[in-house]
Amino acid sequence: MHLDTLPDDARTGDGPMDLNAVRDVSRAVSAAHLFIYLVPETAEEAAELGVTDRGPAYLAFRSAAMGAVPWQVTLAAFYNFSPRAVRAMAGVWDAAPSERWQAARFLAAGRAMRRVNIHLIDDHLAEARSLIDPVVAGADYAGKVLAAANASVALPPDPLVALWQQITVAREWRGDAHLVVLADNGLGPCDCLVLHTATGRLPTTLARATRRWDDEEWSAATARLVARGWLDSHGVVTDVGSAARERIEVETDEHCAALWAPIGNAGARRFASLIAPIANAFTAAGTFPAVRGQSDLA
């Protein structure tokens, strides 16, 4: 699909969505959302609910918008985690109901944003909401499980946290779309993770520790990518593999063009600039790891 053949629902009054604008706003959204997985406030709020293991806490916090679903549902929605990793969340809904996990997530987000001293003046906060609200309201949620779940959550009274939750909807919408593209390209849950780490977008040690694919599974996925010519015999990404990974990102951008169409290219770029202070503040505070980029695999 090319810009001149984008469907009508990806066109605005100022013409078709520019995929560069889609990519830019997607990166800004991902960066503004990412801190929730890294800040100490998240672990502290989980501990208040009786869960001190980082893995199950992450799974509960991110799943909470879906309700107290079985771990198998979380596995399906998250895609790139191994069953053994997600099975570890068994019992989190006994520790606290999903509504309390969601409320605790909002508390962690608000505490963290106040700690790093994020300043969005009222006019900019209102403008950001005027741009993201029609995006969330007008989105097509068919097949977008995590996005739809987050869109169903009542917004908290804290204006900055409410904005962050709307950002979360957009971030999960792209993530849900990305999974469709991965499947269309024949990249299974472990395969996509191996390719992602090979491109340097995510440290292998972090991916292995959190997604918990074992050596045999990781080696089998690597072998499949070698057979496709996407990795060489040493597991290093090839030019063909890099091109394939970029094609997957472009196809994801194409899916997301319709998401941002209600506000157009100018609106998408303006929204990206308005929310940039969130990521900038956490970057200045040293929150983010050295490798950070498009984070559909968060």
Image (spheres, helix red, strand yellow):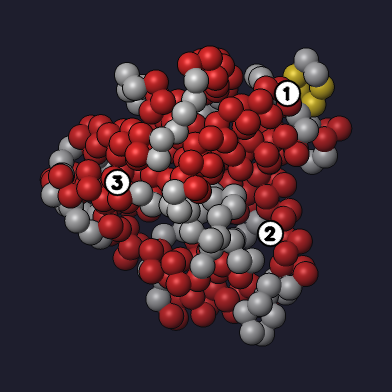
- Residue 52 % position (x, y): 19, 56
Q: State which mark lies toward you, 3 or 2.
A: 3
Element carrying mark 2: helix
Crowding at label 2, few (<14), some or many (≥20) Cα neighbours within 10 Å? many
- Amino acid tagged 1: Ala
Q: Is residue 7 visible?
A: no
Q: Which residue is mark 1?
A: 266
Gap in Å between the C-alphas at discs 1 and 2? 27 Å
Q: Residue at x 53, y 61 (%)?
A: 290
Q: Decide which of tag 1 and tag 2 comes sooner along the chain.
A: 2
- Residue 22 % position (x, y): 69, 36
Element carrying mark 3: helix
Q: Which residue is mark 3?
A: 42
- Residue 77 % position (x, y): 42, 47
For the residue pair 274 and 269, the one nearer the viewer reads as: 274
- Amino acid tagged 2: Arg
Image vertical order of residue 14 relative to residue 98, above or below: above
For the residue pair 141 and 113, the one nearer the viewer reads as: 113
Q: Which mark is residue 245?
A: 2
For the residue pair 21 and 211, the one nearer the viewer reads as: 21
- Residue 183 % position (x, y): 58, 53
For the residue pair 57 and 148, the one nearer the viewer reads as: 57
Q: Decide which of tag 3 and tag 2 comes sooner along the chain.
A: 3
